[in-house]
Amino acid sequence: MNLTKLFQTQAKLDERIMQEHPELRGQNNLDWKLLALQVELGECANEWRGFKKWSKNQEPRTAVVNLCVTCQGTGDENYETVTEDAESGCKHEFMKCEECNGKGDIGFRNPLLEEYVDCLHFILSIGLEINTKTTVDWDDIEFFETDITEQFIEITSRILELRSWESSNTWAGLFSEFYVLGKMLGFTWDEVETAYFTKNAENHRRQTNGY
């Protein structure tokens, strides 16, 4: 894991956001980032679904069809009139969408992983906000016998702890527990980093488009 590269990448996005929202400069942005992290963590839990004991569907959402934006999933880009017929007056021939080759989708997306890396964005941004100097020794991260529900709650506790005690050590504790959660959800760190850089690029595009 290259934590330095992740921090550098996140810093560029944070600076881009500051350029688009100059009112954020010179103020303490920690509280809203902590709240945003809690919201994203809840959305991650929502995609995991394992806490929804009232539901018959508690399977994590890890493979959802990604519909083609161009044709909105129809597979057809447009149509043109070919001939007239007695019933409808015209006959339409549908043109295959070039973007998805008429399939209507462009593969699968992993909502659980997407929400996990959304959390990672804010954890890194919080680390930058408090100017953390920590480096995390992954060999020292301990895996205790717990379940995923308890791990989500533990991370929430670490977020609140960081608000009370802003330090590199508390941030490292938060990051470590988050790393453990990723392992429990079945992600390799290579998968996480790839998804992070993909979403980071999307976040830059959103700033360009006035998101």
Image (cartoon, rainbow, N blue to C red):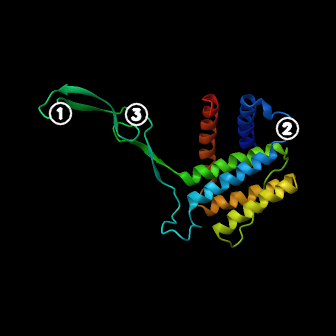
Q: Residue at x 75, y 58 (%)?
A: 176
Q: Residue at x 78, y 30 (%)?
A: 22
Crowd around label 2: few <14 · some 14–19 · many ≥20 (10 Å): few
Q: Are marks 3 and 1 in contact (CB under 8 Å)?
A: no
Relative to 122, say whether 173 is above or below. below
Q: Which residue is mark 1?
A: 88
Q: Which residue is more in the foreground, 4 or 175?
A: 175
- 2 vs 3, front mark: 2
Q: CA distance from mark 3 to mark 1?
A: 30 Å
Please state which amino acid type lies under the numbered disc 1.
Answer: Ser
Q: Position of residue 180 (x, y in %)?
A: 69, 61
Q: Are marks 2 and 3 in contact (CB under 8 Å)?
A: no
The residue furthest left is: 86
Relative to 27, say whether 39 is above or below. below
Residue 138 showing in the rendered view: no
Residue 47, quarter of picture: bottom right
Q: Position of residue 181 (x, y in %)?
A: 66, 61
The residue furthest bottom is: 145
Q: Which residue is mark 3?
A: 99
Q: Is residue 206 left or right of residue 7?
A: left
Crowd around label 1: few <14 · some 14–19 · many ≥20 (10 Å): few
Q: Earlier in the sequence, mark 1 or mark 2?
A: 2
Q: Which residue is mark 2?
A: 27
Crowd around label 3: few <14 · some 14–19 · many ≥20 (10 Å): some
